[in-house]
Amino acid sequence: MKSKKRSTKKDHPSLDIVSSHGIELSGKKIVLCVAGSVAAYKAIELARLLMRHGADVTCVASNAVTKLIQPDYFKWATGNKVITKLTGELEHIKLADYNQSDFIIVYPATANTLGKLANGIDDTPISTVLTVGFGSKIPILMCLAMHESMYENSAVSKNIKFLKNKIEFINPQMIEGKAKAPEPEDVLDYVLKKFGFSSILKNKKVLMTAGPTIEHIDPVRVITNQSSGKTGVKLATELISAGAKVTFVYGPGNEKPPKGAKIINVTSSKEMLNAVKQELMKKFDIVIMAAAISDYVPINSSKNKIKSSKNELRISLKKTPKIIDLVKKIQKDVLLIGFKAETNLTKNQLIKSAQEKLKESSSDLIVANDIGTKYMKNPKNNQVIIVDSKKIIVSTRTSKEKIAKFIRKQIELKLK
């Protein structure tokens, strides 16, 4: 009889919500220290909000908190083991030593927790994690919660003043004689901004194409290109991370489609054209045409496999419609960004080619790059030239991840 497969962390049902609202915090490890305040119940909501934007959250709960909230509740919320005591496993080192986590949030933070950090006292799991994190320079965010009289105590004020330029604070809400912890949504907004969230792109509706297309000569032979779709996927991920709502029309690229986008899978240039026209019946703020669409397709595609016995085979091709040329005819006011790939041109020739495409397609920006010999030697890196009607911006030759950030920045500037 086969033994049952052991459940792993990845199997935990609570992880189903990860990145359901965005991927701004994808790959970020956040330690959530929950100190002994009645506001501790809101820490569950905060943990879930951080996870919905991609974060991996581990909770450290004080002894006082475990009397208010069972540790299993934090385990349920995050899918991770809850730290309530330090053992020979060296939990404080695993969580807060150099580069072990990206951010430590104390929510809620009591006067006691604040005082211990300010004075180097580490006699609890939370204070020890904070001491290690403070020493390893992991950013710490303190979300204070206490009575107003405690908040105005000169010793507390002294501790805040000492830590002010060393860690980060979100001011409490002064309500009913209490310095109440900020709302979880406000903490989430703070964290998103810290990791590059852009309010300029928030809720902007983006239609984007990416990847190659495949045109059939017969059922087994095709005309295509070597586009991996990587730059398009990375750019879409950047836009989603900045709060944009992305519809991603994706040809058969090698890269996994971006999390958090509405994905429309297509194969041929005709399918891509139809998908774009269909989507443009809805209103978009930005359209990005990054796909490497076939310029020519067979006039007559054979329904059966062409026999390989012939010494020569002639295939007649016809030009495909330029999808980018249709966009402004359907949505006049949309911000239109096109991509232009050339091979082995000089910088000036590439710029001229981009400017011509800018005019022909009525685009607002053209992202041009040379995919010739220099690119083929190291396809992981790229260099782009972005052209609009007034200026020319050239990136360094760098990774496609950084190229995507560079393009995103120019889009943001265009929206200002």
Image (cartoon, rainbow, N blue to C red):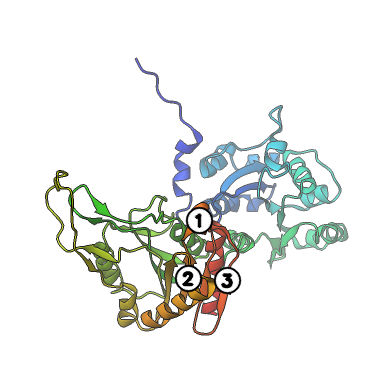
CB-based contact (under 8 Å), mark 2 and mark 1: no
State the CA–CA distance, disc 2 to disc 3: 10 Å
Q: Which mark is residue 23?
A: 1
Q: Earlier in the sequence, mark 2 or mark 3?
A: 2
* Residue closer to the observer: 198 or 78: 198
Q: Is residue 310 above or below residue 165?
A: above
Q: Quadrant of residue 332?
A: bottom left
Query: Local crowd at mark 2 within 10 Å, few (<14), some, or many (≥20)?
Result: many
Q: Is residue 269 left or right of residue 57?
A: left
Query: Local crowd at mark 3 within 10 Å, few (<14), some, or many (≥20)?
Result: some
Picture residue at 48% right of the left edge, 53% below the top: 19
* Residue 379 shows in the view: no
Q: Earlier in the sequence, mark 2 or mark 1?
A: 1
Q: Earlier in the sequence, mark 3 or mark 1?
A: 1
Q: Is residue 332 above or below residue 275?
A: below
Mark 2 secondary-structure assignment:
strand
State the CA–CA distance, disc 3 to disc 1: 28 Å
Q: Which residue is mark 3?
A: 394
Q: Is residue 166 left or right of residue 360?
A: right
Give the residue furthest to the front: 311
Q: Which mark is residue 367?
A: 2
What amino acid type is highlighted by mark number 2? Val
- Percent from the top left, x then y, of residue 149? 79, 62
Between circles 2 and 1, the one closer to the viewer is 2
